[in-house]
């Protein structure tokens, strides 16, 4: 399997610069968003109270208060911006894994060497997971280091609508880990769908379009269904249902975290098997 | 030993047959040139050898096994018609990368190959000219002394000096027992290195002949000059002669096959000069595909 390791290593190396740019960009969005806690937390809470659509889009289910540090980070970043950005990266990686290199013509030459299609399929899937994981870690470290600058680790006193006050605890490192893990997981699932479509068809457009469509359609279905109640029976298809409903960053890990990983395993295995059975595209 | 063996090899996309019922056997140490017009099915055939494409029907074996088998591939040097490598990969990185996937080549041998082809291998692939990309491809194909070379348009983009170098390289590899399967539109490549040619036309093998057969079959035009104007019937009854034309003291004929009888008759008639214009592989190629050109 030394050939597979070399392919994995080279694929990462070819994406070294883009990995740095993506990771730094995602982390920068998180840090900049976190910087607005003191000035934006309260107004975010008022907006959320104004309508169920906004609440749904911000992932503000019962008991999540955006005036708290964790609630703010969840509503302003970890429930929307972060997973979307990580999804975009994951879909780009899942598309590039097989279909992208096939369309560029570089996959064929690798396959003329003494390496199996299985080794390439596995090396590329591992590469996709690795780069996504690196981005998640960079984001975690960046937010964890900068959080004290914005008082996110400190307890806050919240004044309710009736004038009563309460104290909410500050952000914990564990919440950042769980929030990042959930975003990583939901993104990985989308990347795996791109991988599956690309491996099955060898076409970049199908992989990118299919996976992006799945992510966006799932989001629209989930958020609008939350508002109207229509098509609620279909929302199990949407990865956003467990992601936003569970709000693991605030409420803690649930077994639902396993769904995207299971989806990833199924998609990668299916993509690998379909890749073995088809012609390479020109 | 048969190094490439195809039986009834067919590749169809819908109703279109890119390769149709191809039977082929290429022996050890042989250089087989697979010729045809653009889109005739040459590259599709090569891609089936390496399992990039799966036959619709029929079968193909290379080096006694499947092109999908890494062990088999480790003995093949492949140059695709359009080589694409990761854009930022330099030539020397490509040597090490593809060497690490298979067998790491002898550094001195790689350097000698690069020197021979005049390749500077420290620039990224996307910055290389067409010819330099071809050189990288040739180094990668030859660097492990493969038992089988599959070369698709190997000299495309190379200057005449490098084309000559390439021919020398192929001959050297043949001499050490390697088998070569190549496609080319450069007939001088084929003339010099091939032992046998196959002409593919719309996916079907139209002709297959050895270079010896080719030379025997080849035809030519002969122009003879006589002291006085010759009679147009001078060569009546001479085997293989046709298209006799007389202009002043010159008589032009088309000869199909051996010229022995023609020369004997010319001597009898007292010819003082002879000019020959031999048909070569290129004419046979053009003859084979003239029906398409006339469409």
Image (cartoon, coloured by chain):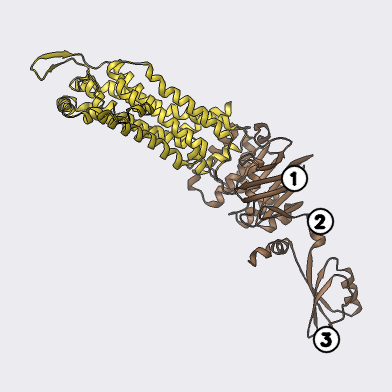
Between residues A80 and B142, which one lies in front from this camera angle? A80
Q: Earlier in the sequence, mark 2 or mark 3?
A: 2
Pointer 1 and pointer 2: residues touching (CB < 8 Å)?
no
Indicate the secondary structure of the residue bearing disc 1: helix
- Labels 1 and 2 share a subunit: yes
Q: Chain of mark 3?
A: B
Mark 1 or 2: the one toward you: 2
* Chain represented in yellow: A
Indicate the secondary structure of the residue bearing disc 2: helix
Residue B207 picture quarter: bottom right
Provide the residue designation for mark 2. B212
According to the rendering, which colour does chain B have? brown
Residue at coordinates 73% horizontally, 37% vertically from top-left?
B63
Residue at coordinates 54% horizontally, 41% vertically from top-left?
B91
Residue at coordinates 54% horizontally, 27% vertically from top-left?
A5
Horizontal side of A125 relative to A280 (left or right) equals: left
The alpha-carbon separation of the residues under discs 3 and 1 comes to 51 Å
């Amino acid at each position: 399997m030394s050939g597979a390791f070399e392919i994995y290593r080279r694929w990462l190396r070819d994406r070294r610069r883009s990995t740095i740019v993506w990771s730094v960009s995602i982390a920068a969005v998180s840090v900049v968003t976190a910087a607005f806690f003191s000035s934006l937390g309260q107004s975010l809470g008022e907006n959320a109270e104004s309508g169920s659509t906004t609440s749904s889009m911000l992932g503000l289910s019962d008991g999540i208060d955006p005036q708290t540090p964790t609630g703010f980070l969840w509503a302003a970043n970890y429930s929307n911006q972060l997973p979307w950005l990580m999804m975009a990266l994951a879909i780009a990686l899942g598309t590039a894994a097989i279909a992208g290199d096939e369309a560029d013509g570089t996959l064929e030459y690798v396959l003329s060497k003494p390496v199996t299609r299985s080794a390439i399929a596995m090396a590329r899937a591992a590469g996709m997971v690795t780069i996504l994981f690196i981005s998640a870690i960079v984001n975690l470290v960046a937010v964890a280091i900068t959080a004290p600058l914005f008082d996110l680790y400190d307890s806050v006193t919240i004044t309710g609508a009736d004038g009563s006050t309460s104290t909410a605890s500050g952000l914990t490192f564990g919440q950042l880990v769980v929030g990042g893990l959930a975003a990583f997981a939901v993104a990985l699932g989308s990347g795996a769908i791109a991988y599956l479509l690309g491996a099955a068809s060898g076409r970049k457009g199908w992989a990118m379009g299919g996976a992006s469509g799945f992510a966006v359609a799932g989001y629209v279905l989930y958020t609008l269904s939350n508002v109207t109640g229509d098509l609620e029976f279909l929302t199990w298809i949407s990865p956003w249902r467990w992601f936003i409903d569970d709000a693991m960053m605030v409420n803690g890990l649930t077994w639902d975290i396993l769904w995207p990983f299971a989806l990833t395993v199924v998609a990668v295995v299916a993509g690998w098997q379909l890749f073995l059975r088809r012609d390479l595209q020109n | 030993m048969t190094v490439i063996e195809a039986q009834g090899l067919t590749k169809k996309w819908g109703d279109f047959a890119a390769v149709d019922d191809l039977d082929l056997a290429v022996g050890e140490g042989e250089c087989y040139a697979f010729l045809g017009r653009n889109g005739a099915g040459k590259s599709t055939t090569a891609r089936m050898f390496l399992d990039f494409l799966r036959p619709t029907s029929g079968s193909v074996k290379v080096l006694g096994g499947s092109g999908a088998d890494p062990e088999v591939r480790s003995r093949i040097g492949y140059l695709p018609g359009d080589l694409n490598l990761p854009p930022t990969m330099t030539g020397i990185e490509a040597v090490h990368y593809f060497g690490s996937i298979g067998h790491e080549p002898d550094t001195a041998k790689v350097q000698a190959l690069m020197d021979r082809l005049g390749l500077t291998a420290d620039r990224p692939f996307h910055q290389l000219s067409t010819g330099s990309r071809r050189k990288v491809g040739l180094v990668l194909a030859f660097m492990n002394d493969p038992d089988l070379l599959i070369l698709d348009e190997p000299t495309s983009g190379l200057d005449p000096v490098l084309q000559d170098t390439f021919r020398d390289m192929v001959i050297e590899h043949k001499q050490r027992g390697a088998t070569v399967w190549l496609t080319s539109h450069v007939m001088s490549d084929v003339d010099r290195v091939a032992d046998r040619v196959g002409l593919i036309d719309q996916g079907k093998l139209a002709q297959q002949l050895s270079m010896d057969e080719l030379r025997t079959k080849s035809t030519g035009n002969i122009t003879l000059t006589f002291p006085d104007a010759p009679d147009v019937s001078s060569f009546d009854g001479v085997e293989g002669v046709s298209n006799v034309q007389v202009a002043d003291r010159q008589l032009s004929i088309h000869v199909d096959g051996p010229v022995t009888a023609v020369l004997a008759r010319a001597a009898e008639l007292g010819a003082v000069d002879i000019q020959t214009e031999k048909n070569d592989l290129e004419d046979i190629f053009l003859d084979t595909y003239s029906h398409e050109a006339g469409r």
